């Protein structure tokens, strides 16, 4: 079994709960309230900025030019595709790019991004790949699953979102990242593979928490 499959298997209950979360299913059937989706889009924009910072550390730590190029492509896809999608979506909601940039991270967004940045800064390139994998792989998996079940006919914004994450470009990036984690694990010692598993597991939990925070429209207590 591939190492990434082992990681996925160990976190299966979390991933199953993520797919069944009412925020995710609400996108799929078009019933998610638009205010919740607006909240999510603003927080995800903030998240993606920090996600790119974590990937940039993988570029710096990668051992080969080919690996550097793939991580750089991940940054390109995120900055020039996902974030452009966010700006476009938010324009449909009358949210300006200036308002996006002024969005303050929720407690969950803050904690998740600190987990990624701290792991990428202090850990190996293998740990960095593992900490970002649940986001890349999870979104591709959710996009594919929602597309297969049929996009919501009465909510074109959600259809656009599903089609974006169902795209071959996102699937290719997730597949490459899985392959990188597998390849790196082959030569990593026990302590490093354990650190990679821990980073993956915690990120998987944060992925669920991120959807849940958007469902609750989480705010700071004071």
Image (tube, grey):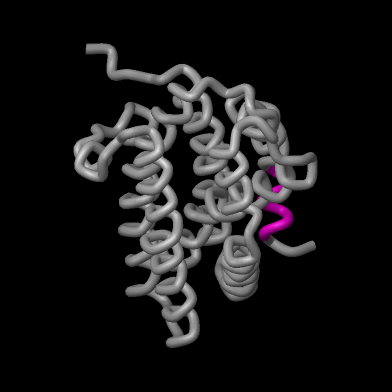
Q: Chief secondary structure of the magenta span?
A: helix
Does the stretch in magenta take in 194? no
In the picture provided, is 136 more to the left or to the right than 220?
right
Within the image, what quadrant is residue 100 found in? top left
For image coordinates 73% across by 56% down, the residue present is 5
**Region in magenta:** 4-10
Question: Which residue is nearer to you in this view: 105 or 194?
Answer: 105
Q: Is residue 44 above or below residue 211?
A: below
Within the image, what quadrant is residue 189 found in? bottom right
Residue 131 point in image, percent of width and height: 48, 53
For image coordinates 57% across by 59% down, the residue present is 193
In the picture provided, is 89 more to the left or to the right than 110?
right
Question: Which residue is nearer to you in this view: 71 or 11?
Answer: 71
Question: Which residue is nearer to you in this view: 94 or 50?
Answer: 94
Q: Which image quarter is the N terminus in? A: bottom right
Q: Which image quarter is the C terminus in? A: top left
Would residue 114 be visible to someone looking at this image?
A: no
Residue 183 point in image, percent of width and height: 62, 74
Within the image, what quadrant is residue 18 found in? top right
Would residue 131 be visible to someone looking at this image?
A: yes
């Amino acid at each position: 079994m591939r190492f990434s499959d082992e990681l996925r298997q160990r976190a299966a209950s979390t991933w199953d709960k993520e797919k069944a979360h009412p925020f995710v299913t609400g996108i799929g059937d078009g019933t998610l309230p638009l205010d919740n989706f607006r909240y999510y889009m603003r927080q995800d924009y903030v998240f993606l900025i920090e996600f790119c910072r974590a990937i940039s550390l993988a570029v710096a730590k990668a051992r080969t030019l080919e690996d550097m190029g793939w991580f750089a492509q991940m940054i390109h896809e995120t900055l020039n595709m996902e974030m452009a999608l966010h700006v476009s979506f938010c324009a449909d909601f009358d949210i300006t790019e200036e308002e996006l940039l002024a969005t303050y991270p929720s407690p969950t967004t803050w904690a998740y991004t600190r987990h990624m940045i701290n792991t990428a800064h202090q850990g190996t390139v293998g740990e960095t790949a593992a900490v970002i994998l649940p986001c890349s792989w999870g979104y591709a998996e959710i996009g594919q699953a929602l597309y297969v079940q049929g996009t919501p006919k009465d909510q074109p914004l959600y259809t656009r979102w599903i089609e974006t994450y169902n795209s071959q470009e996102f699937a290719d990036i997730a597949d490459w990242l899985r392959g990188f984690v597998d390849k790196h694990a082959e030569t990593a010692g026990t302590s490093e593979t354990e650190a990679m598993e821990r980073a993956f597991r915690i990120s998987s939990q944060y992925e669920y928490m991120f959807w849940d925070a958007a469902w609750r429209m989480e705010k700071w207590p004071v």
